[in-house]
Amino acid sequence: NAGVTQTPKFQVLKTGQSMTLQCAQDMNHNSMYWYRQDPGMGLRLIYYSASEGTTDKGEVPNGYNVSRLNKREFSLRLESAAPSQTSVYFCASSPTGGHYGYTFGSGTRLTVV
Amino acid sequence: ILNVEQSPQSLHVQEGDSTNFTCSFPSSNFYALHWYRWETAKSPEALFVMTLNGDEKKKGRISATLNTKEGYSYLYIKGSQPEDSATYLCAFITGTYKYIFGTGTRLKVLA
């Protein structure tokens, strides 16, 4: 009953460091997403992958890169972390375009100092 | 810029009270509206998927209605319990991969 698994759960980075957030789903979903959650704002889409082999920018892609490694895994990379990237990051998946709702991971709380 | 607004931002109710809150969205380009329940330190869980004007959905003590012509959806909780305490999030879908979240209504049910 894993659903969507994200790692790590918490991370502290220094400005300029890089890191990769990992996400895997075991529901055979085609589409996967990365969102960030900031206080007072709704979840904002960073990148999504409609299907294996494709990725597209969302609302706030600057400073991030993604890789859809296979159907199960979708990673988010911060090449040079900035304090503005301090946020809670959620990975999600859906069978197709999200019309029938998302399944979310448990989130990664990232602090950039 | 499409905007999805939820009100109130937060509310406290007593155990046993019934309550409701609103999600407002643009009345054009409607495809679907979703409601999620988001407990602290957990991830959002889907409650309802609503696609037709006049839709009503129910899950236990929680129900939702949809008015696409005027651009709003109501979520109702009957006889609130402490375990209902969570943030209730709506998402407005205008097309494939066009998904806009509201900022949520934070509900606290006092025992």
Image: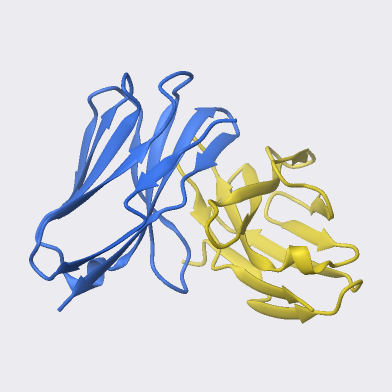
Residue B38 locus on image (x, y percent): 40, 62
- Is A110 rendered above or below residue B56? below
Quarter of the image for the N terminus of chain B: give it: top right
Residue A77 x, y percent position in the rendering: 82, 61
Which quadrant of the rendered structure holds the C terminus of chain B?
Answer: bottom left
Q: How is the image coloured?
A: by chain
Q: Is residue B84 left or right of residue A109?
A: left
Quadrant of residue B50 in the image? top left
Decide if residue A97 is in sight here.
no
Label count reads 0
Residue A71, horizontal then vertical, whole percent:
70, 49
Name the foreground residue: A12 vs A66. A12
Task: Tell me the quarter of the picture where residue B80 sits.
Answer: bottom left
Residue B103 in the image: x percent, y percent? Answer: 46, 51
**Residue at coordinates 76% horizontally, 63% vertically from top-left?**
A84
Q: Colour of chain A?
A: yellow
Judge whether residue A64 can be spotted in this image: yes
Up-down: is A11 above or below A69? below
Q: Is residue B28 left or right of residue A19?
A: left
Which residue occupies the foreground of this view, B46 or A58?
A58
The answer to whether residue B102 is above or below residue B15 is above
Q: Colour of chain B?
A: blue
Q: Which residue shows up at 76% across the image and 51% down it?
A: A70
Q: Nearer the viewer, residue A12 or B10?
A: B10
Q: Residue at x 63, y 70 (%)?
A: A108
The residue drawn where x is 40% and y is 22% is B27
